[in-house]
Image: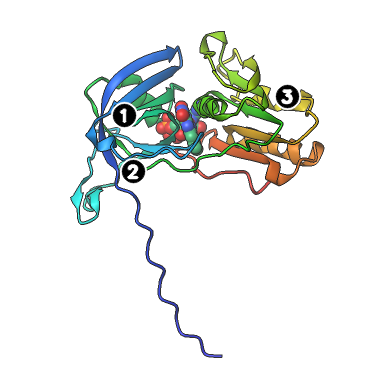
């Protein structure tokens, strides 16, 4: 059979990045800073559900200059003759379309450009945010229970997930943070049992306590789901436990590596499918 070459599929157009302004900076805890972005350019941003993410573009680390997108035939786009700025994935913690304000909570972990940028961010600074959030996780409203595990980087996503759970669900939540000063209020309509795990040691890989916690969780009866986001190797250890020791169905668990020890800009879509 003679086959003719297929025309290349049209490239999916990425929504234009948005140029926002920092309108507030608040220190939530010693290691978590909330930056509130605002401005007309956020008009039309649509939240599709909890635990989604946007990309925050960062200034050049040597020059401190943030490359701004410029108007092009398809809206704002980064200039083709300049290096595209680095970006990192962050969870929209609150989006208020009526006042065009977007809160994003940054862990100040002390190493990467995003953490360093957030630690020095000032009201009035310009910021560039990807066009639309993506990757929302829509909770199973008919489930009986949820087991939710995560570290500091996952805490904003966990907060959005708990805010989205209906009152009929019982949620067992394990969050590893540095110490008790990193704990936050986590409102939910669901019945929540929140366990804060304190690492207390700057040298331990964040998330090791989550692996132990999962080992000791009594999986409740009924229809349930497990949601885990953490450092990539920790996420894989927990995923392996869930599949091999707990015999849970792949479709009932959602795991994601939010960052990876020693890796810069770890992939946004590391769901641990290789485990
Ligand atoms: C879907 C998604 C949502 C996310 N939401 C949030 C959020 O709301 N808030 C948030 O703070 N993070 C969030 N993250 C994680 C964040 O994208 C990463 O932590 C990112 O690596 C930070 O960029 P950086 O420039 O500071 O560090 P990078 O340049 O990426 O890494 C530099 C070094 O720092 C280490 N490192 C990176 N992150 C951490 C960390 N959290 N703790 C300890 N060491 C780290 C790396 O291993 C590397 O050695 C999210 C990630 C994903 C995929």
* First of labels 3, 2 by sequence position: 2
Disc 2/disc 1 C-alpha distance (Å): 18 Å
**Number of residue marks:** 3
Which residue is drawn at the image coordinates 44% and 18% (left, top)?
Answer: 32
Q: Tell me the residue that label 1 is attached to.
A: 98
Compared with 169, 264 (above or below) is below
Q: Is residue 260 left or right of residue 194?
A: left
- The quadrant in which residue 103 appears is top left
User: Quick check: marks 3 and 1 in contact, CB under 8 Å?
Assistant: no
SS at mark 3? Answer: helix
Using a 10 Å C-alpha cutoff, classify the residue at mark 3 as few (fewer than 14 neighbours), some (14 to 19) or many (20 or more): few
- Residue 134 bears which disc, if any? none
- The quadrant in which residue 129 appears is top left
SS at mark 1? Answer: loop
Q: Quadrant of the N terminus?
A: bottom right
- Residue 131 bears which disc, if any? 2
User: Quick check: marks 3 and 2 in contact, CB under 8 Å?
Assistant: no
* First of labels 2, 1 by sequence position: 1
Residue occupying the far top of the picture:
181
Which one is closest to the eye, mark 3 or mark 1? 1
Which residue is drawn at the image coordinates 54% and 33% (left, top)?
Answer: 261
Q: Is residue 132 left or right of residue 65?
A: right
Compared with 141, 210 (above or below) is above
Query: Under 8 Å from ligand 1: the CB of mark 3?
Result: no
Residue 55 appears at what percent x and percent y?
39, 38
Which of the two residues, 7 or 133, is positioned nearer the viewer here?
133
Which residue is drawn at the image coordinates 67% and 40% (left, top)?
Answer: 253
Residue 59 appears at what percent x and percent y?
28, 34
Which one is closest to the eye, mark 3 or mark 2? 2
């Amino acid at each position: 059979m003679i086959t003719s070459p297929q025309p290349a599929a049209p490239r999916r157009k990425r929504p234009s990045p948005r140029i926002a302004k920092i309108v507030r900076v608040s220190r939530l805890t010693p290691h978590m800073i909330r930056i509130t972005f605002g401005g007309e350019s956020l008009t039309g941003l649509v939240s599709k559900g909890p635990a989604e993410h946007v990309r925050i573009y960062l200034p050049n680390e040597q020059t401190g200059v943030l490359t701004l997108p410029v108007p092009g035939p398809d809206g704002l786009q980064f200039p083709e003759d300049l290096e595209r700025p680095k970006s990192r994935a962050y969870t929209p913690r609150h989006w208020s379309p009526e006042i065009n304000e977007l809160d994003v909570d940054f862990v100040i972990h002390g190493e990467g450009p995003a953490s360093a940028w957030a630690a020095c961010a000032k009201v009035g600074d310009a910021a560039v945010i990807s066009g639309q959030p993506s990757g929302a996780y829509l909770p199973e409203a008919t489930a009986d229970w949820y087991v939710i595990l995560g570290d500091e980087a996952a805490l904003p996503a966990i907060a959005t997930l708990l805010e989205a759970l209906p009152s009929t669900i019982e949620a067992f939540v394990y969050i590893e943070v540095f110490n008790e000063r990193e704990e936050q209020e986590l409102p939910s309509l669901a019945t929540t049992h929140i366990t804060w795990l304190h690492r207390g040691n700057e040298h331990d890989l964040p998330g090791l306590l989550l692996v132990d916690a999962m080992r000791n969780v009594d999986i409740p009866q009924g229809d349930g789901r497990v949601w885990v986001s953490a450092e990539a190797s920790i996420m894989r250890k927990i995923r392996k436990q869930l599949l091999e020791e707990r015999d849970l169905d792949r479709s009932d668990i959602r795991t994601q590596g939010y960052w990876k020890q020693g890796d810069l800009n770890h992939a946004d879509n590391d769901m641990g499918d290789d485990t």
